[in-house]
Amino acid sequence: MTGGVRRGTAIDEKDSGTGRGAPPSGTSTPAPATSPVDRTGYQALRSVLRIRPFRRLWLVLGAASFGDWLGLLATSVFASSQVTGDTAKGLAFGGVIAVRLLPALVLGPVAGVLADRFDRRITMVICDLLRFVLFASIPLAALLDIGGGLVVGWAAVATFLIEAVTLIWIPAKEAAVPNLIPRSRLEVANQLTLITTYGLTPVLAAVGAAVLDRSVRAASGGPPQGLADPTQLALYFNSLSRLATALVVFFGIREISGRRGRRESVEQAAGQAERVEQSMLRQFVDGWRFIGKTPLVRGLVLGIFGAFAGGGVVIGTANFFTKSLAAGEAAFYLLFGSIFLGLSLGIGLGPMIVREMSRRRWFGMSIVLASASVLVLAGSIHLSMAILGAVLVGAGAGMAFLAGTTLLGGEIPDEMRGRVFAVVQTGTRLVLILAISVSSLLVGVGGSWQLRIADLGISVSSTRLLLLVAGAAGIFTGIKAFRQMDDKPGVPVLPDLWGSIRGRPLFPAEPFASSGAFVVFEGGEGAGKSTQVGRLAEALRQHRREVLTTREPGATGVGEQIRGLVLGRETGPDSLAPRAEALLYAADRAHHVATVVRPALARGAVVISDRYVDSSLAYQGAGRTLPVEEISWLSSWATGGLKPDLVVLLDVEPRTGLARVGSRGGDPDRLEAESISFHDRVRDAFLDLAAADPKRYLVLDASRPADEIAAAVADRVTGMLADPETTVHPEPARPPDTSTQPKLSEAELRDDVDLSTGAARSAEVERSAEAGRVHHDQPAPGGGDRSGSDGDDPTSQARLVGRPGRAPGDSVDGASGRERTGGSAGGVELERHP
């Protein structure tokens, strides 16, 4: 077989035990091909587990991994039980765990070379037999009655030797797996192995140790001794699991022996040996130099080290912490298992929860979650609370681990990746060793004491204080890493997380600086927006300002076509659905902002628009009762986060406004023909938006004379312009002919709208806007970015409160809606002055 994966035969070949899979005699060899079906999830796992050699290896590795985790727990507890005194127990417990990590610092590169020089199956079998003997020797040493110190010393030596042998066994196993399965399924196989090793078996080991401890104690009627000690039984089980692994690999998985050609093996070994000769100090120097110059990697490494330090403190203090809860060794096993249960949940479910959230942000937030959970653990007064804290610690650490490894593998240049990984791998082991060892020693020395307040005695232990310090330091580390790595500056964190969970992550506003100003007129039907747009534009032009008046929809050729669709009065099947209407308005706005508004602002013009984002929030959100947060997100995406400097809201009672529209003659359009209740909701939505952000709104009663409205608008715009001495005074207009204004009947006034209440509310909002107006807080027309942060911060964006169809607190950032204005062809009028 020359290469590739042959369709339909790979599984059969593996099952038949033919190793690399030569086709049976007398059969044709299909052309190499890949399956057209993308196997993921359950089907992908099934396809891998149908390969008999890999299935056998996976099962035996699962049993061995279960034994290893059980042995880790048992060895640590066993060592601490051989000595007396809190200080000695702390040293014994932390020392045994730290010794397991030490060989990788010394023998890691050499072990990889040795593993690749010999038959992998024989290498794995010999390593497992050695571990069988070494694991069994630890409890057997306790039977010799040679003293607790010597037993602990031998446990440390045996642990060091076991880990040294494991360093040879692991690369042999990893290199053998590709011989058992097609390359196309290698990733799924690795995922299955990792989930089993670091997700499932640690939890089972912790539960098994707890059950074993309780069962033996219940059967013996007291503290067990000798061979009946649960920790010794666990070590014997671990030893036997390694013997079983050796037998299955030697007799049942002969395919592992597949080796590469002699020349390739020798060349690869020589290359690895050459890399071994490189100084570890030199690798550290090169790696740290790159880390120090790169904010992303610096924050990433800082966060990883902080996460491992916090995890080391939790592990190092766990045995003493359970004693502060008046719990036994079974509680320690449960806490240990809870951490790894959370770890597997974080790795497995984290990406499904945060979905499209930036992995850089997710990394920092995961560290903060894990560290805050350490604080919960420190304050636990019951085992159930401690278990919850441990699960959350593991979940945060698991998500940080997944995000961190993804970023390291995907965003570091290939030529530096190995050195950075060397720093990270070596550094994490050093940090973990120090954290476990030092924390175990400190809690052993510190002990606990009673704090009495009145007649209440509270037990305060050094374990809890150390956990508090570790949690606080971890939060600081996570925040520091987040700030250094943040790829969405200005976007609020919690709203971004909530939006990502709901499938609508926030995004940074498009960078945009201009010397112009953006003014928007909003309001219901017949509010007089078109009149005031023209009055303000004329006043600005008299003072030699470049002014562009525009509208939505219909400011462009494409916009005119969309305008005809959204305002037409088609009925039946051709009538626009509310969501289709919202999408059309967003499409018009995206094109309008990109081709008309932004270019004009960039050259310093004052852009005056008849309707913008708030119209969509009011008409499609409140009026059509669509989810306002969805309209907000859609509109913010369409505009790139561009916000107006000033929104002038002309408030008018719906019946008055519709009567004005009717007096013009002609048939009402699609929105004008809506019910009074529809327009009431629209009006309330506009007022809610203005009340939520009074600094950016100018609310005026549209029933006031047009000259007064124009003067108020001009005064507000004057404060926004670059030259504070420039004052805009619009030309007075002739009083309107009130004889032509329609009179509302008593029946109309009696409808469910109270005009006096509406006017009072409008005046109240206007006073609120005036009180909150601070001119120097307005974005300077000549500088800065007017584009809000991505989806706009719901903590500062407007909200619709109490509107039909939505709950209070729904965020409503940028979006748009409906439009009407006169104006020149295309809806855009521009006049330049030299």
Image: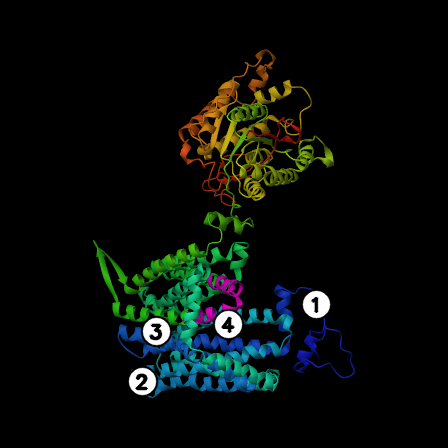
* Residue 186 coordinates in the image, percent (x, y): 60, 72
* Residue 60 coordinates in the image, percent (x, y): 54, 78
* Residue 636 coordinates in the image, percent (x, y): 55, 42
For marks 2 and 3, give the CA distance: 16 Å
Residue assigned mark 4: 197
Residue assigned mark 3: 94
The mark closer to the camera, 1 or 4, is 1
Q: Is residue 403 above or below residue 568?
A: below
Upstream in sequence: badge 1 or badge 4: 1
Q: Nearer the viewer, residue 379 or 716?
A: 716
Magenta-drawn segment: 400-426
How does the figure colour the protein chain or chains?
rainbow
Q: Is residue 423 magenta?
A: yes
Disc 2 secondary structure class: helix
| Residue 93 as seen in the image, left or right of residue 38 | left
- The residue shown at (46%, 54%) is 486
Residue assigned mark 2: 150
For marks 4 and 2, give the CA distance: 32 Å
Residue assigned mark 1: 35
Q: Main secondary structure of the magenta part?
A: helix
